[in-house]
Amino acid sequence: MSVLTATAFIDTHALLHNYHVIKEKAPSSQILTVLKANAYGHGLIDIAKSLSNTDIENNIIANAFGVARIEEALALRNKGITQKIVLLEGFFSTDDIAIIVANKLSVVIHNEQQLAAILSAKIHTPINVWLKIDTGMHRLGINPDEFTYFYQQLKNSDNVENSIILMSHLACADDIHDDMTLSQLSCFNQLTAHTEEAKSLANSAAICAWPTTHFDWVRPGIMLYGISPMKAQSAQSQLLKPVMTLQSSVIAIRQINQGDAIGYGSAWVSDKNTTIAVVAIGYGDGYPRHAENGTPVLINNRIVPLVGRVSMDMIMIDLGEQTSDKIGDVVTLWGKGLPIEKVAECASTIAYELICNITNRVKKITLS
Ligand SMILES: Cc1ncc(COP(=O)(O)O)c(C=O)c1O
């Protein structure tokens, strides 16, 4: 006997398909694909390698990669990734500057401390800098009234490459009715209109819905993985295909009677005689503990509801009274056949969190 335990199947064809969707939506922009947090839980190195192979026209795909931590950038360099790698939050220690130069990393500069550190560094090779402006999100970025000062300081420094990329980040691009994006765009345009520098503003949602934000570099994350970046719009409607399909299998089948309670806390009580399957996946694998009763699960081409509390290694699903499902049958938790956005909604979270939370014990199998 051998049954599948929690496994994330990573579909390389879907990944490349999504990449081409991005290219079609932003044909005049270069693409920085965001690979932070282990490529949104999909596996940093495998995803980077898939995006570094040559395509049919022999073009190297993926112009650059974006990461959040220097360790992620070094992991990529150590595996032979040669593309531009941008540290999206810049560096957190002056000591990192030597490592940045040695590994040819690009850095976002978003505060006074980083500016001072880069200007005074004793280095012989200039660094590629992305200057981040806060146009309204109020997370990272210099204030608009600091722009001229930062820009001139960087421009005059031998430690900084001559071409600086000007960037900002959008707070509400996932909502096509929210004026915030236009307000941020207008602020960005006013500040940067008189420079010749390359510009970057668009995340996935802006790539899909706000073409005037595309500029020279787009920065897709979530859509690359086949997940909808838009509020109330499916991935399918954006022509995206899910890259990760999370599956496991049935390890027990139980007949229960009306009135029987299931799982920890006896939190779900059956209102009928039914068949319950126990599936080998739980919050120890990254399946969300807060998934509510009724969260959809796919088995043998039909959707059935999750019942009872999610435990560390198991969940229960209600198969109904008459069923031919059996131990070993494969169950899909999300991905092909079951949009992750629906599962996220039932767990009061977003798909970004679900994919990032996949734990190490989940096997990853790349389908190419
Ligand atoms: C600066 C920056 N650009 C782009 C992205 C990609 O965003 P998304 O995954 O929504 O496309 C992120 C992700 O948070 C980011 O921090």
Image (cartoon, rainbow, N blue to C red):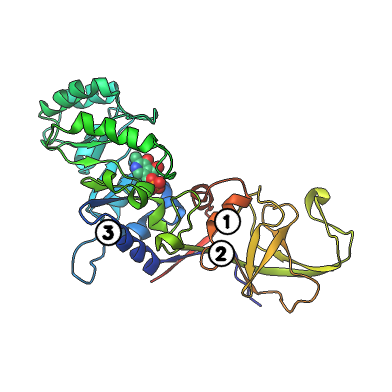
Disc 2 marks a residue whose amino acid type is: Leu
Q: Position of residue 11 (x, y in %)?
A: 42, 67
Question: For the C terminus, which image quadrant?
Answer: bottom left
**Location of residue 106 with respect to 142 vertically, above or below:** below
Q: Residues within 10 Å of mark 2 (few under 14, many from 20)?
A: some
Tell which circle, 3 or 1, labels the residue nearer the N-terminal end: 3
Q: Secondary structure at mark 2?
A: loop
Q: Nearer the viewer, residue 99 or 246?
A: 246
Q: Position of residue 348 (x, y in %)?
A: 61, 45
Q: Secondary structure at mark 1?
A: helix
Mark 3 sits near ligand 1, with its Cβ under 8 Å away: no
Q: Could you give the CA–CA distance between mark 3 and mark 1, rounded to whole angstroms?
A: 27 Å
Q: Nearer the viewer, residue 341 or 35?
A: 341
- Residue at the spot of label 3: 23
Residue 338: which numbered mark, if any? Answer: 2
Mark 1 sits near ligand 1, with its Cβ under 8 Å away: no
Contact (Cβ within 8 Å) of mark 3 with mark 1: no
Q: Secondary structure at mark 3?
A: helix
- Residue at the spot of label 1: 342
Contact (Cβ within 8 Å) of mark 2 with mark 3: no
What residue appears at the point 66 percent right and 47 percent down from the top-left corner? 290
**Location of residue 322 with respect to 133 vertically, above or below:** below
Q: Residues within 10 Å of mark 3 (few under 14, many from 20)?
A: some
Disc 3 marks a residue whose amino acid type is: Lys
Q: Nearer the viewer, residue 266 or 166?
A: 166
